[in-house]
Amino acid sequence: MERVLVTGPDGFVGRHLRNELGHAFVPHERDVLDGSSLSAAVRETQPSAVVHLAALSSVAGSWSDVAEVWRVNVLGTVNVAEAVRSEAPGARLLFVSSGEVYGRPAHVPTVENAPVAPISPYGASKAAAELAVRQVAREVDVVVARSFLHIGPGQDERFAIASFAHQIATIEHGDAPPVLRVGNLEARRDLSDVRCIADAYLALLGSPDASGTYNVSTGRAERIGDVLDALLRLSEREIEIEEDPDRLRPADIPLLCGDPRRIAHDLGWRANRPLEQTLLDTLTFFRERLA
């Protein structure tokens, strides 16, 4: 991979992918809704691959501005796909989708050929964006990564696990009372370390055997309340838990877990970082930022 053009290069995954790709990493920092700028960037760099990360990625936040989520996540993806098709059709296009497209699946862990039935605006926009990239798949080498929830150092505190770690670090620092506010703790989620996710994208970019759609997941579901308990055991303070109605979603998925056997079989990728280490690294990130 000589040149990999990456949209959303300064986002959570983008920063880790930059570390992995090194000099091959070519950031596209402009708005993906600017189709002419995007086409010009692809034409000028002639990348060997394009990774489309740029998106409005908060499931909870997607309910507050549905139209904007669809505009950025779908129209932005159309612009990326068309830029690759017209300016660098020999490049591999890796589109990062989400396990949220499955909605409330009938079978868990969920395989790639399960029905797509999203229930959130975010999930629906990702499902529509998958259709957009498949429109160019006859002319472009398209690979879709349906990534399940990923966590780790550098994640925005709008997201649940990062929010817990940020609140704990803030309380430890003496900047807040010892009360941690939470949403639904009964939900169960498939949690990967963001650094494992970056490794998966490298495998999907570099392997000639990669094709079609892959779940990027662990195959295990963790109760969010249990993850919070693990974080609290790492804390230096006694902290109370308080439910915050503002952190509850209009519609939530009780259980979401992807079957990773296809990516393991085709590419040998597995999420191999212990959850406990990921949680410690996440908490350490916020402690160091506050220090």
Image (cartoon, rainbow, N blue to C red):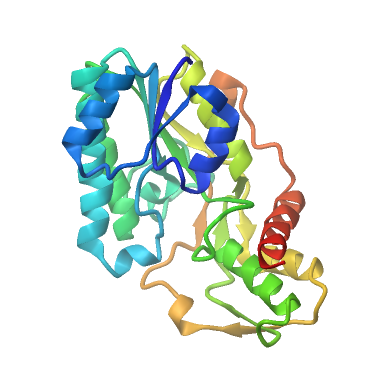
88 with respect to 253 (left or right): left
Residue drawn at (32%, 17%) of the image = 46
Looking at the image, residue 225 sits to the left or right of residue 150; the answer is: right
Give the percent coordinates (x, y) of residue 16. Answer: 57, 39
The one nearer the camera, 22 or 241, is 22
Is residue 118 among the parts visible in the rendering?
no
Left or right: where 244 falls relative to 103: right
Task: Give the position of the C terminus as an image quadrant.
Answer: bottom right
- Residue situated in front as seen by the camera: 285 or 181: 285
**In the image: residue 91, left or right of residue 161:** left
Vertical side of 239 occupied by 24: above or below? above
Residue 211's spot in the image, x, y percent?
41, 20
The residue under the point 67% across, 75% down is: 170
Q: Find residue 269 and report its horizontal and vertical position in percent.
A: 61, 27
Task: Find residue 249 and report its image quarter.
Answer: bottom left
Q: Is 209 above or below relative to 28?
A: above
Residue 242: image x %, image y %?
Answer: 61, 85
Residue in the image at 79% along x and 70% along y: 235
**Residue 223 visible to an observer of this rendering:** yes
Q: Residue furthest bottom?
A: 177
Point 47% across, 37% down: residue = 111
- Residue 259 found in image quarter: top right
Q: How many marks?
A: 0
Whether residue 209 is situated above or below residue 163 in the rendered picture: above
**Image: 203 above or below 195:** above
* Depth order, front residue of 257/131: 131
